[in-house]
Image (tube, helix red, strand yellow):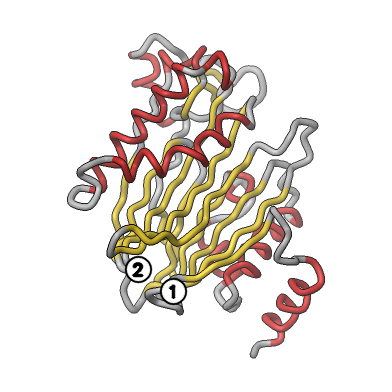
Amino acid sequence: MAGKEILHKMKERVCLGSSDPDSGKGKSKIAKHVTHGFHLVKGKSNHAMEDYVVAQFKQVDENELGLFAIFDGHLSHVVPDYLRSHLFDNILKEPGFWTEPEKAIRRAYRITDTNILDRAVDLGEGGSTAVTAILINCWKLVVANVGDSRAVICKKGVAKQLSVDHEPSMERESIENRGGFVSNFPGDVPRVDGQLAVARAFGDKSLKMHLSSEPDVAVDIIDDDTEFVILASDGLWKVMTNQEAVDSIKHIKDARSASKHLTEEALIRKSSDDISCIVVRFH
């Protein structure tokens, strides 16, 4: 065992008990070499933690699903918590999920966003980004996202981004076609109507006329070259490239230790945002 991995295992025993609500791990029942781990760290802002995760394997009839998600709230911890409780249920309720999962996910995203907007009196005016990954029987991975949380897969040591960062500057034309605008004022980050730094999100009722909740969806097949997948909020990606993240954990075999290492590395690099990370390992 490499010295770096031994050090991480020692740190995990000292710092991360199984009762830690901000950290956890699990494994597939049909392929026990497929494991997952997650870790969350609150940022330096004065508001409550606005990141929520889902990380679990679930038996559905004769199939096993790995359900993984990062929900990163803005002006709200209520909307991402609602997504944690409802989005996957809505996806799995779609009658076409097993035959056309991409279409089912798109429809469930739209339905969930409508439900959030309809309940704005209870859920508030805030919103949330989302990146979800569904692992079907440990061989097919379906990733969807709105916003700037990201999914990255590692094959033979090479990072490949599976999600799309929905930046206002990249979607300026569609925002303006809806009657909105993109401005760098105040600050130096492009924002929808000068307020929101992502072009797609759940909720945000006051901006919804100018925002989209339509996800980008990607499908990848898990083969012998696939090593792991990282899902993380932008608190990580603001300070690390995809390849840097992959390189920093490629020798850490325990998925929870790997996710914790990524959050620690983001903190070392001065990330001040909430940081959430899930690692799913295939070897």
Type of the residue with mark 1 = Phe
Quadrant where the N terminus lies? bottom right
Q: Which mark is residue 138?
A: 2
Residue beneath disc 1: 282
Count of number-bearing discs: 2
Q: Nearer the viewer, residue 224 or 86?
A: 86
Query: Spatial distance from mark 1 to mark 2, Cα to Cα?
Result: 9 Å
Res 195 seen here: no
Q: Quadrant of residue 188?
A: top right
Please name the residue shown 75% across and 66% down the image: 17
Residue 145 point in image, percent of width and height: 41, 42
Q: Position of residue 269 (x, y in %)?
A: 72, 54
Q: Are marks 1 and 2 in contact (CB under 8 Å)?
A: yes
Is 244 above or below relative to 179?
A: below
The residue sitting at 31% across, 74% down in the picture is 223
Which quarter of the figure has residue 3? bottom right
In what element is the residue under mark 2?
A: loop
Crowdedness near tag 2: few (<14), some (14–19) or many (≥20) residues, C-alpha within 10 Å:
many
- Left or right placement of residue 2 versus residue 87 in this view: right
Snapshot quadrant of residue 34: bottom left
Q: Where does the image place residue 169, in percent across and percent down from the top left?
A: 46, 28
Front residue of 82 and 219: 82
